[in-house]
Amino acid sequence: MLSTRHAGFFPLLITFAALTVAATGCGNDDGASPQANAPDPAPPTTPSGLTLVKVTEDGLRLNWESSPDLDVIGYEIYTYDPDPGRSNAYVKLTGTPVTSSSYVFNNPKPDTEYYFKVSAVNRFGFESESSSPFRIRWDGGPFESSRDDGHADRPPRDGGDPTPGGPVGGETPGGHHEDGDHDPGDR
């Protein structure tokens, strides 16, 4: 008789377990696995092509090629501003990441050399490496890129004029600019 009772109880237990699993499910309630919501441990790809597009009395307009990563939410822009009280000579110009691939540096001083870098920030807060430094020495005159793609022509390394057809060497309206793998302190 005892074995008959166990035989009757066992199918009931299996039926109860199957109904419990069917009613509660076998995973997260939100349907996403924990790995799908985990931050990507890699920072985004570094933006490239930082260049000068336009100079007016109000500011220097910089453009760059967007990072190809889909989770990028914006860009941080830095300028070289050495100060013995800080460990880093580059300071962030943006309070929050800018969402476009363009930035206007307001109120530049004529006859001043500026260096800029840009980095990408993803939705998890990770920041890419900074781009190569981009240098411009602005003499106070207007400049606008004449290229259809919105990027300024790059001058020769000898400091030639960035405007097409302009004289090579010497300072001209719009100033000189270049990009490269050197920082201002590397001279």
Image (cartoon, rainbow, N blue to C red):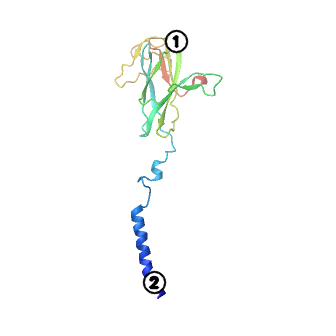
The secondary structure type at the circle numbered 2 is helix
Give the CA separation, mark 1 to mark 2. Answer: 98 Å
Q: Up-down: is 37 above or below 79? A: below
Say which residue label 1 marks: 111
Residue 147 drawn at (x, y percent): 36, 22
Judging depth in this view, the residue of 106 and 12 nearest the camera is 12
Q: Residue furthest bottom?
A: 1
For residue 101, the mark is none
Relative image position of residue 186 (x, y in whole percent): 60, 24
- The amino acid type of the residue labelled 2 equals Arg
- Residue at the spot 52% in from the left edge and 32% down from the top edge: 130
Tell me which residue sits at (45%, 50%) in the image: 36
- How many marks the image carries: the answer is 2
Q: Which residue is mark 2?
A: 5
Residue 84 picture quarter = top right
Quarter of the image with the C terminus in it:
top right
Rendered residue at 46%/39% (across/down): 123
Report x, y in % for residue 74.
45, 33
Mark 2 closeness class: few <14, some 14–19, many ≥20 residues within 10 Å: few
The answer to whether 160 appears left or right of 85 in the picture is left
Q: Is residue 108 left or right of residue 146?
A: right
> What type is the residue that disc 1 sits on?
Asp
